[in-house]
Image (cartoon, rainbow, N blue to C red):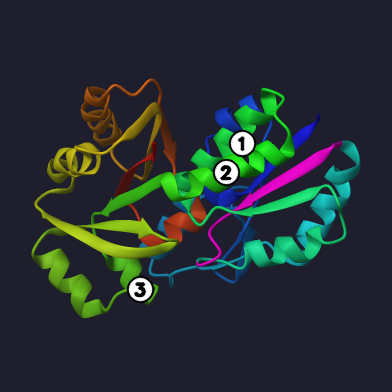
């Protein structure tokens, strides 16, 4: 059976992984400086950071629209036995709802709400792609994803809350206080929603080893794969995080950089480790 795996650009998988698994990426939209760009195609995270650092307003983001999905499914549906599209969580975007509308015209197109974002979504995409390569049926892959979605562990630490404040996700007073006190909040994703967890205090690079151990100690973790995802960090920072992660026996450690959609909301110097629980 030929199963085509597709995903929204918010999965933040590297070009190498996309090529290895022949995944079709569907871009969201980012608008800034009077223009609207496709995430990862016409605009990357550095474009966002330069715009904001130059005094521009925080860019806005928009979902993949129904017309885009119709064009995608019209192209892929006749060429494959099944087309599986995995979207960013429906709590964060209407990509899932738009994809469902477009998929209604095709009996072999399946849409899955990852209930996640960035490489939390990406981990599910990789699991689906590997299952498709093994020749598993679309029904088995859908059942597997249904069982894995609650087991994705997504957290990240934000150096500064400036972008979250600009986007209205926290008050400017809270952001100022956190920055003055050098607080680095851990953002947790639970049941498709984000919440603030432990607040670390100190320099960004110094708090990350404690963050990693807090996330991994005592958890029943699947050690086949872990992803270190970040936005414009000094290269030494994710490298140092990998040294701590390696202590837990992961077979594969993937490094990737978050795309422009995710970067719009968290800003530079954000880092997370994402993995699956058993």
Q: Are marks 2 and 1 in contact (CB under 8 Å)?
A: yes
Q: Residue at x 12, y 42 (%)?
A: 206
Q: Residue at x 27, y 79 (%)?
A: 171
Q: Residue at x 63, y 32 (%)?
A: 129
Please give left or right for residue 193 compared with residue 78 in the image: left
Q: Quadrant of residue 166?
A: bottom left
Q: According to the image, label 1 marks what residue?
A: 128
Q: Is residue 87 magenta?
A: yes
Quadrant that contains the N terminus: top right
Q: Quadrant of residue 17?
A: top right
Would you place residue 27 above or below residue 124 in this image?
Answer: below
Q: Are marks 3 and 2 in contact (CB under 8 Å)?
A: no
Q: CA distance from mark 3 to mark 2?
A: 29 Å
Q: Which residues are magenta?
A: 80-91
Quadrant that contains the C terminus: top left
Task: Pick the residue in front: 127 or 168.
Answer: 127
Please give left or right for residue 160 compared with residue 93 in the image: left
């Amino acid at each position: 059976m030929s199963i085509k795996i597709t995903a929204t650009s918010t999965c933040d998988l590297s070009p190498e992984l996309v090529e290895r698994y022949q995944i079709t990426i569907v871009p969201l939209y980012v608008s800034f400086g009077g223009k609207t760009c496709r995430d990862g195609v016409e605009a990357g995270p550095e474009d966002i950071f330069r715009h904001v650092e130059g005094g521009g307003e925080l860019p806005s983001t928009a979902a993949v629209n129904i017309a885009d999905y119709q064009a995608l499914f019209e192209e892929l549906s006749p060429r494959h036995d099944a087309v599986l599209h995995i979207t960013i969580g429906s709590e964060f975007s209407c990509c899932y709802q738009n994809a469902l509308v477009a998929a209604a015209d095709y009996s072999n197109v399946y849409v899955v709400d990852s209930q996640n974002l960035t490489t939390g979504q990406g981990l599910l995409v990789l699991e689906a792609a590997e299952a498709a390569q093994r020749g598993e049926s679309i029904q088995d892959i859908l059942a597997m994803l249904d069982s894995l979605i609650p087991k994705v562990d997504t957290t990240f630490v934000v150096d500064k809350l400036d972008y979250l404040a600009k986007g209205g996700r926290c008050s400017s007073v809270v952001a100022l206080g956190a920055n003055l006190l050098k607080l680095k909040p851990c953002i947790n994703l639970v049941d498709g929603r984000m919440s603030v967890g432990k607040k670390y205090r100190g320099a960004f690079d110094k708090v990350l080893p404690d963050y990693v151990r807090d996330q991994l100690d005592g958890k029943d973790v699947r050690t086949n794969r872990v992803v270190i995802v970040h936005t414009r960090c000094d290269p030494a920072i994710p490298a140092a995080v990998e040294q701590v992660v390696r202590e837990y026996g992961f077979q594969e450690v993937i490094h990737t950089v978050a795309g422009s959609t995710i970067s719009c909301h968290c800003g530079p110097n954000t880092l997370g480790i994402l993995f699956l629980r058993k």
